[in-house]
Each structure stands twice: as structure tokens, then as C-alpha cells.
Image (cartoon, rainbow, N blue to C red):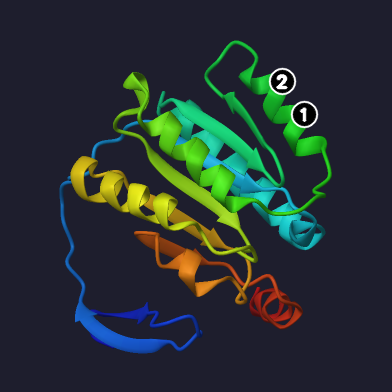
Amino acid sequence: MEKQLLTYRLHGEAWREKVTERPVVHQDVDEQPRGPFIVCVDTSGSMGGFNEQCAKAFCLALMRVALADNRRCYIMLFSTDVVRYELSGPEGIEQAIRFLSQRFRGGTDIASCFRAIIERMQGGEWFDADAVVISDFIAQRLPDDVVSKVGELQRLHQHRFHAVAMSAHGKPGIMRIFDHIWRFDTGMRSRLLRRWRR
């Protein structure tokens, strides 16, 4: 596919993927600033098992990037409540170790997670932060006020919202809010195919 990129676009509430091709633009200079970022990890029961291991691995990798690049990193763990801590804070490493050793249980309140992200991004030191949400996105739809506030942050303040989708069954209405979506299929078929290709 000579320098073509396949992209997917969602329409409506149903998962219908439309494949479109567009040229890949390679840039020699990274135009995006390397500011702080907020990592949100879904710790609900549906993220247990292999999804839990993958989510922890992704979170750990992002924490390592933050430490290596001397970037501020704020971690939010959400299920029915949102637990927050700053990795670069005085107890950040101890809290990260505690998170990596706990089990995922509970429901999913992704709206509270987004409200916490919005609150953090409106704080003075986090005005240029981006957010990464790691979840299966099996949750209730987002309230309209949250969707409009996220859109405002994207348009007016150039905040970027990234998703690592751990399931093919996430709610399309939630997925539409993100600037970038990385799909990591944790289903048995995909896991076996990845292992077989090694």
C-alpha cells in the first residue's frame, strides 16, 4: 500500500468501520510540545485478567517515558471512584508500586474520570497536558456537558485525548471523543495470533 494509511471512522452508535486511504505525511521535526500528560487507567472488573496485565504494562511504560524525559505525569485510576496521584510527586513511585500490585474490581464511571481530567487540565501547571485513557470503554455514555467541555479543550486549548482501547466492544459514542485511538485486541484469537507470529 505505497505510503497509504488506513484509518477508521465511526458513524452513529453502531460499530461500522469505514476504511479510507490518505497519504502519510512524514515530518522531520516534532511539532508537538513534549509537555506533561495524564494517564487514566480503568480499574473496573471488566478490565481484570489479561486486560489488567496489559493496562498495567501500558501504564508502566508511560511512567517510564515520563521519568526518562523529565515530564510531569499524573495518574488517575478509575472505576466507581477516581484515585489520583502525581508520579513526579514525593510519593509517586511508592504509589505506582501499590497500583501495580492491586487487583482490578468495581464498576466503570468514565464520566467521573473525564471530569477529573478536565479539572486537572484547567489547573495552572497542567494547561498544556494531554490525556491517555486505557480502558475497554464498556461503560455508560458520556453526559453532554462532559463531551462539550472536552471538545472545547481540544479546539481552544489544543489538548489531545488519546485512547488505548482494550476491547472491540467499547461504546462508539465514547470513542468519538478521542483524537487518537490505539486498538489493542486482547481477545483469545488475537493473543494466539500474536504468539504464533513470534
Residue found 25% across the figure and 85% down from its top? 21
The answer to whether residue 170 is left or right of residue 95 is left
Residue 54 lies, in percent from the top left, at 68, 55
Quarter-wise, where is residue 128 in the image? top left
Residue type highlighted by circle 1: Arg
- 145 to 51, vertically: above or below: above
Residue 111 lies, in percent from the top left, at 55, 50
Quarter-wise, where is residue 167 in the image? bottom right
Give SS at disc 2.
helix
Residue 134 lies, in percent from the top left, at 58, 53
- 134 to 18, vertically: above or below: above
Q: Name the residue under label 1.
A: 98
The answer to whether residue 14 is left or right of residue 145 is right
- The answer for how far apart the CA atoms under marks 2 and 1 are is 6 Å
Residue found 23% across the figure and 44% down from its top? 158
The reply to whether residue 30 is visible in this rendering is no
Give the label on residue 4, or none: none
* Tags 2 and 1 touching, CB below 8 Å: yes
Give the label on residue 94, or none: 2
Give SS at disc 1.
helix
Residue type highlighted by circle 2: Glu
Residue found 80% across the figure and 50% down from its top? 106
The reply to whether residue 29 is visible in this rendering is yes
Task: Name the quarter where the N terminus is drawn.
Answer: bottom left
Q: Depth check: give the residue in front, 181 or 137.
A: 137
